[in-house]
Image: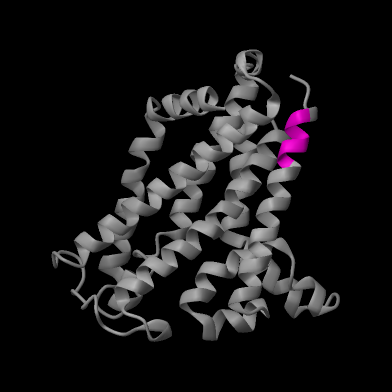
Amino acid sequence: MRAELKQEFYKLGHRKLPWWIISFMILFMIFMGLAMGKQYGNLLVMTCYNSSQIIMLILVIVGSTIFSMEFQNKTILTLLYHAQNKGTVYLAKFITIFIYNLFLHAIAMIVTIFFNTVPLIAKIVPWTATYKYNQSLFINMLSTTGVDIITSTLIISLICLMSCMINSNTVVIMINAIIIFMGSSLSSNLLNYNIGPVDIIRWNPLNMLNLTTQYYNYATYHLTSHLSNPQLLIGTLCYIVLFTLLGYLVFRKKKF
């Protein structure tokens, strides 16, 4: 397992895409600061300048290449030949994407701290100010980041599952991008059109994408999700386990 992890980290670190794409995240955060910084300073700091969706999109682009490109280029055969079993290869790739996810969130927090220290694009708001959940703004930022790591891990589990099912990197990126940007709306439509029992439909996996947004805007998104924060958290964790295991089963039975 250690050898597989070392190899995955080496490949990720020597690719240009995972590094230069971070600049798009920072540019997006700058844009959000310029557009909303004067009116929504506290909210921007709490959400790391609304970096959640852009981080998920980066994970989709980078993460899908870790799987799909190796399937297309048949380099996966070399990995499987030297590995103990298919499980270690799959798990090493999952852990690598997850660590990259932590890295992206750490960068987002560092950039947020810088923007809220140097008044370049938005007004500075005090870190000790009480904001959501009767917590200081700094704790709000840490908590929201922690919640978003869980939400983005759900996307990682979907990336792993779909990449094992679909060999085309482009198709995997397109499907997951649609899920990121339209998944919550699709779930909301399912709930609003009364096509079935709400108590069951509200537990659909697309609804779990509301976890982060509902955490920092409960009053609005609770009406959309029909679930409480703890319920969304439990549902998200369950789907992470389910999709990760399904991805492993597909990967194990996949013929290369």
Which is nearer the eye, 146 or 108? 146
Q: Can residue 215 be seen here?
A: yes
Q: Can residue 177 be seen here?
A: no
Q: x%, y% of residue 179?
A: 63, 55
Residue 188 part of the magenta segment: no
What colouring style does the render use?
one colour
Residue 250 part of the magenta segment: yes
Which residue is drawn at the image coordinates 48% and 58% (left, top)? 53
122 lies left or right of 27? left
Which residue is drawn at the image coordinates 54% and 44% (left, top)? 60
Residue 230 against residue 151 in the figure, above or below = below
Residue 138 against residue 71 in the figure, above or below = below
Residue 249 against residue 222 in the figure, above or below = above
Q: Which residues are magenta?
A: 247-252
Which residue is drawn at the image coordinates 69% and 52% (left, top)? 241
Residue furthest out toward the right: 196
135 lies left or right of 241? left
Q: x%, y% of residue 37?
A: 26, 73
Q: x%, y% of residue 121?
A: 19, 65
Which is nearer the eye, 122 or 59? 59
Q: x%, y% of residue 59?
A: 50, 45
Which residue is drawn at the image coordinates 58% and 39% (left, top)? 94
Which is nearer the eye, 233 or 198? 233
Q: How many marks?
A: 0
Q: Quadrant of the N terminus?
A: top right
Q: Main secondary structure of the magenta part?
A: helix
Which is nearer the eye, 237 or 218? 237
Q: Quadrant of the C terminus?
A: top right
Q: Quadrant of residue 232?
A: bottom right
